[in-house]
Amino acid sequence: MKKQKWFGWLVLALVVMLASCQSTVTVRHLVPAEVNMGSYRTIAVASTSLSAPALNYYPTWSINFDDFGYRLSTGYERNAAKNAAELATKTFTSTLQSSGFFTVLPPEQTDKYLALGDDGVALLKQKGVKAIVTSSISYLDLDERPFTEDIVENQLDPTTKKNKQVVTGKKYYVSQRVTLTFSYLVRDIESGTILASNSFTDRRSRDTEIARRVYRGSSFVDERRYAFAYAPSVTSMISSILDAFQNKIAQQLMPTWKYTTLALMPNKPKEANVQDAYRMADAGQVEQAYALFRAQWDATGHLPSGYNAALMQEAMGNLSDALTLMNQVASRTGDVKASAAVHRMLAAQKAQQEAHNQINGTTSVGESKVTTTQIITGS
């Protein structure tokens, strides 16, 4: 029985090892935005606003470590909410500008126009603006509290001569957790119709060691591990939360690149002529690998070579040529894996064409209205 169990684990280890050694290639395809913004390429982006609760939020507590007499003030600065809004404005605007899909009137200009009311909106229309983008932080909260953790060591018991766990001290921490909700809305400047809106909630937590008490027989030694009179600033945690929202925002409002790692078909039946092609693919030498795979496929009809040559073309950005070759491989060999790859490539080609239609403003499908709420569990 033990021998069978050992053999089973050996087989499993070999499978894992072989899988980890399998050659792969990364392909990318342009995918359409969830909302067709092709008719709204010129947008005016307003500064991120703060809801009254978020603006007025400020914790008044102090964080006490009674064993030491230490007291820390909160890590939430008095201007933290304002800084969060400014950071959200910068991050959100950068996301909309970075792809080049939109022509963006920045917040410092948009705010001035919107402050003029209807006259300002009329001026925005004259500038060619098609949609107004607004955003807000509707919820911002901080939880801070102290906690302790025993220091445990293994020590030899002189009586039993066996190791036992002994508490040799205590660590003192401050735990911080920030929760933030960010929302945005895109509105047609002419009709006022909401084209898209989304709301995200996320949180970040962090533990910082403040002090340590080490037992020395019947006494102890205290060690200060944190030198400041205030808890660590939560600004970096707020920034991390806002950064986490940006990919989803980009996917909703503009065409984006999707990257996929694909496994090459193993060299079975083995052909010595393409051994180097696998190493080239792993090294990122896609064009050289394609040349070897394609030559072998053309010369002998070697299935893995034809399949992998099509993947190399796809990785080089030649999706149409890759699809033609993969379809040829599937038709000639009847291979199920090649047929599945044809269907995957067809779907990618269709999505890519839709993305180009959005970029060119030629898609015939009407604008999609998307209103969603995203709750993202952070760490």
Image: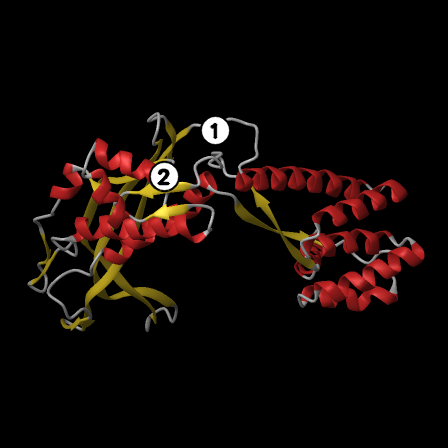
Q: Considering only order in the chain, which callout, 1 or 2, is on the residue closer to the N terminus?
A: 2
- In percent of the image, x 51 and y 43: which residue is there? 255
- In percent of the image, x 80 and y 40: which residue is there? 336
Task: Look at mark 2 in the image and give the residue it sits on.
Answer: 129
Query: Is 179 left, or right, of 269 in this rendering?
Result: left
Q: Secondary structure at mark 1?
A: loop
Q: Is residue 277 above or below residue 2?
A: below
Asked whether residue 278 is in view, the answer is no
Query: Is 377 left, or right, of 260 in this rendering?
Result: left
Q: Nearer the viewer, residue 180 or 158?
A: 180
* Type of the residue with mark 1: Glu
Quadrant position of residue 52:
top left
* Type of the residue with mark 2: Val
Find residue 367 and name its label.
1
Query: Is 260 left, or right, of 194 in this rendering?
Result: right
Instruction: Tell me the CA gap for discs 2 and 1.
Output: 17 Å
- In percent of the image, x 79 and y 51: which residue is there? 307
Nearer to us of marks 2 and 1 is: 2
Query: Is 32 left, or right, of 23 in this rendering?
Result: left
Residue 246 percent coordinates (x, y): 40, 47
- In percent of the image, x 56 and y 42: which residue is there? 31
